[in-house]
Image (cartoon, rainbow, N blue to C red):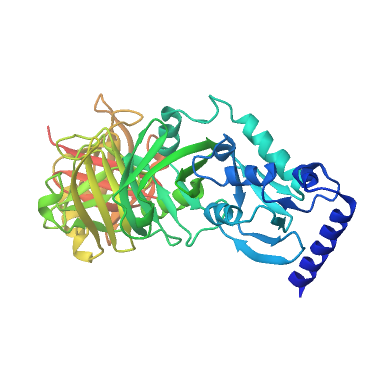
Amino acid sequence: MKKVFAKFMFAALLMGTFTLTSCQEEFEELPDNNNDKAIEASSATASLIKDTSSEGGQNNSIECIDFVYPIDLFSFNINLEITNTITVKNDTELRLFFTGLGENDIVGIDFPITLEKYDGTKITINSNAELVTAIEEAKDSCDIGQNEPCSDEDINEGLLGECKFKITNLDGTFFEELYIDFSGNNVHVYDANNTVVDEGNWSLQSGNLQINSLSATLGNYVGEWKVISCGDGLFKLKKGEETIVLAKSCDATENSNDEVASLLKECVWSFTDANNTFIGVVNLKFLQGGEVKFVDENGGLSVTDRYTSWEINAGAIVFYNANQELISERWEITQYSETEISLDIYDNTELEYQNVLKRDCNESAAACSDTDINDALLGQCKFKITNVDGTFSEELLIDFSSNNIHVYDANNTVVEEGNWSLQSGTLSFNNLSTTLANYGGEWKVIECGDGLFTLEKGEEIIVLTKVCG
């Protein structure tokens, strides 16, 4: 009923327009007419609309402003008879509608409509006059030198950052909530549950983003996309008749980074394919302090490189200060769950291996039994205390014999003493009051092996290394 009434009122307005005008040429200037309700098919306004909705349009406005769909249109002939009613959903449908009109047909647009400028700004249009003004202003703003708002360097820097990008159409919707990670020149597509649903790669040349090898959710989006605008974490890409918007979404990346980091710190992780690890080992443990250890077949842990640290960065496990013969620097996470993490393992920028880490929380993978810990600490050797990076506030050696604690400085002078006990893999340091006063309390033994213990209390980790000389 609403549409019928709207058409009736439009026809009435047209009748008034014809009554007040004596020749068709008046319609050529409708954008300047107070009624401002109709567009003649042969008018300059109609031509401007067709140009704006044309691929590679005849003026620069095609690069600088877009219609936001859907748009409702209806047409009348010279006798004020309704000839067509249509809802157009894209540029192609709009252009074909205008192209199919007869010379004497008259078009009405169901205002308000929305236009989007090259910088992502949306403007509401309430009349033909406003429509013409908006297109002309956009055309004038798109002079040579502004059609490519970003250099390749700008685009690379934006896409290769630490954030994902949400993909939408111009109206902010899409057929599914998807986020894309462009880091490492790969394309990983994540759904709302942060599960990888598609992957490929990309390259860039002269402002054209080439997306390759997508085959699942975004398989139809493979090809060359022209970057027609960027700025403030937003990229607008155009390919043929289609325009998509990539909006930076750092919260999605940050949340997934934190989630994976928490998962890694639980239990031991084992590669499913021992031949494709690059590092020559199968089992790993990621420690709170950023250190990583390798687990041998008996469940014991050993140091890889005491100065190596790790973090989750932009959807990848990244290692710093690593021995390159043992650990490649970047393990790209392609998919993860609570029990499995799929990885692309890179040597610099070259993909070397693909593998899957599986979580193993079996108690047999514990670092050491109480018997092992007791036997080691009650021996004849002292232990050097350090942080996970091998440093400490001063050089100290600890003697744990007879369940006592004697702490020696570099001059072999006792500077602290106390006692210790052990239960279920947890060491309790008691009665420390001077040099190591802050180190009293319960320390969980999270690893041991080859004369080395790693202890954890809250967020702090210390390493005890056997010194028998």
* Residue 201 at x, y percent in the picture: 31, 45
Residue at the spot x=41%, y=50% of the render? 180
Q: Is residue 182 visible?
A: yes
The answer to which of 42 and 98 lies nearer the viewer is 42
* Residue placed furthest toward the front: 23
Name the quarter where the C terminus is drawn.
Answer: top left
Q: Quadrant of residue 183?
A: top left
Residue 64 vertical placement versus 409 (above, below): below
In the rendered image of this protein, does residue 413 appear above or below residue 160?
above
- Residue visible at 49% across and 30% down in the picture: 150
Q: Residue drawn 64% across and 42% down?
A: 48
Front-most of 15 and 468?
A: 15
Percent across and percent down for residue 348 are 23, 35
Say left or right for 230 vs 427. right
Asked whether, in this view, residue 355 is left or right of residue 145, the answer is left
**Nearer to us in this view, 174 or 113:** 113
Residue at the farthest bottom position: 1
- Is residue 232 visible to the viewer in this orientation of the structure? no
Image position, residue 373 (x, y; %): 20, 53
- Total numbered circles: 0
The spot of residue 235 in percent (x, y) is 50, 41
228 w.r.t. 72: above or below: above
In the rendered image, which quarter contains the N terminus?
Answer: bottom right
